[in-house]
Image (tube, grey):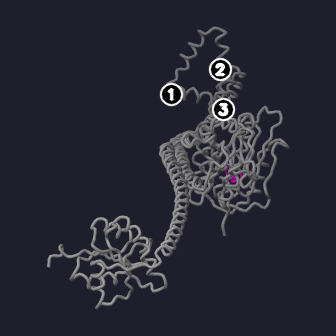
Amino acid sequence: MDQSTLPKILYMDDTPDARELVVRILSFDYEVLVAADPLKGIELAVKTRPDLILLDINMPHMSGREVATRLKSLLPRTPLVAFSADATPGARERALAAGCVGYITKPLDIDTFSDQISAFLNGKREALSNAAEVGKAYQAELVARLEEKVRELSKVAQDNALLNEQNKRLVSVLQRRQRLLEAAARVGQSITSILDLDELLRATVNIICEEYSFYYAAIFLLDPSGEWAVLRAGRGEAGRAMIEAGHKLAVGGNSMIGTAIGERRARIALDVGEEKVHFKNPHLPRTRSEMAMPLLVKDTVLGALSVQSEQINAFSDDDITALQALADQVAIAFNNAQLLRDLGAANRELLRTKTFEAIATATGEAIHWVGNKAAPIPSAARRVREDLTQLLAVSRVLLEEPPDTRQQHPLWPVLENSFGTAADQEIDLEAIAAELATYDTRQLQFLGGLESILEDLQIIEESATTILNIKEDLIGPARLQHITLISLPRLLRQTVQGMGLPAGVVQFQVDPELPSIRGDERQLGQVFNNLVKNAWEALQGHPQPRIAVRGQISNDEPNSVLIQVEDNGPGIPPELLDKIWVSFYTTKGGRGGTGLGLSACMEIVNQSEGIVSVESQVGKGTTFSVTLPIASG
């Protein structure tokens, strides 16, 4: 059968089983269209214009009666039939008042249902006896429903407005967070390329203020004691003034920076006037909000970053997240720069040490050879002095003898033997005498001066002795050590007492209970002797010379003792502090000194697994520090 020629029926019902049953019963005689939703059903009805519309009264969103009222205005000639299980009094009348021409109750009767539909298609219309009264009641119902819908729509509108505001705030927050993260990325990119620590500190505060439009930014780093956060970089003139004044804040004290470092978490003051731990800085009078974030690398706190605004409530929790991420990048950049600086310092120290070792090795080999050659010179000079004086004594005695009896004198063979030796050495005494005879009286006064000869011999002997002392300073530390337990208080006191310094010059401040160490007592005694001797020589001409010898447990090196020799002399210029350890370098000028004492001290202390260092201020004095490990066991 051609379906297009069959009457068209539209059935609206939200129950799938009901729709399926109606389709099965009517599809043989009719073209059946279905809709599960009232609004879609209305659209389908307008589009297809069915011959009859069958409506379930109880549907979501719109009741069947409301649908009937709407369809009656859209399709006034199409019969509408209510199909419902509602058997309450007045249900049929309300449906007819809404525009339906009939009312079929559920459940449907399979035997009669098709005939009922056919009757309505063929013009059947159910009468409504009290139409005016029912119509008025239905109108009131529609108005009530309309009011309910208006209230629902109003509430939806209010909810939508609230959601819209929330969405705006959320979008604003997300946009701000995005800007913060983008700025953090730009700052991180800018600072990670800077390897010089001081330049990095200055650049970071400037970039942060420029990218975030902050009033002020500053970076504090912990001092070696860990008790103070010291300002290392600050924005603008305020930062420069505070750095010059040595501005610092106590860790955990009455400041945002100190609290952030002490608690290892960010601190926010949305209104600094109400913040208990805010440091009221006279250099920053316009600060209204402040955030302080610790600079952390793993578990290590390096310091803190402070950002300040002229606005109250300038920061939010999202700012903490973004700016703490920035602070973490800053901390990593600082740590890398510090590691690079330390690496450079370690490299320079290694180069210096290796240079010293190379110099010491080369000069040690050379001076060993020179020392061996110089060893006989002092005794030879003494023998020459003795031989010369003896020869002078013989000559004096023989000159007092008459010429005819000189050769019979017992001492004549001594002089005769000297003449023979001169001949053997091809020294022409007669030619020398003939030449001297040509000198005038003034020239002869300068010949044969015994004082000059003895002075030359003294110079020869002292020079050879100096060479031998140099050899001892260089070769001594390399000799086989005799390791014993050493009482430093006893060794230091014996060393100082054996130097014969004036009373009251040395202030002995050594802990008598200082633990023993292991080492070569003779070599370590030489170290302390050299240090005290250098201090005393530096104090020559000082109106109130003072040398302090101190000994205590080291605070910096574990299981070690610290010995310091301090003087109040002229000090050593900074540019010379590295040079004093180089072999043969001396600051004593013409006052003597081989320039090997300190290099020998360094070698001996290094062999003892210790550390020797120097600190000096020009015009205030010098302190040499020797750190040695405490004997174990």
Of helix, strand and loop, which one carries label 3?
helix
Sequence order check, earlier mark of 2 and 1? 1
Q: Can you identify the residue that label 2 sits on?
A: 448
Q: What label does residue 235 carry, if any? A: none
Q: Give x and y (percent) for residue 325.
A: 54, 54
Q: Nearer the viewer, residue 521 or 517?
A: 517
Query: What is the x, y in percent for residue 165?
Result: 55, 55
* Label 2: element kind: loop
**Depth check, front residue: 361 or 72:** 72
Instruction: Give the vertical position of 222 relative to 144 (above or below).
Output: above
Highlighted range, magenta: 223-227
CA gap, disc 2 and disc 1: 20 Å
Q: Amino acid at mark 2?
A: Gly
- Nearer the observer, disc 2 or disc 1? 2
Q: Quadrant of residue 400?
A: top right
Say if the magenta span includes residue 149: no
Q: Which residue is mark 3?
A: 385
Residue underneath mark 1: 425
Vertical placement of residue 524 versus 483, above or below: above
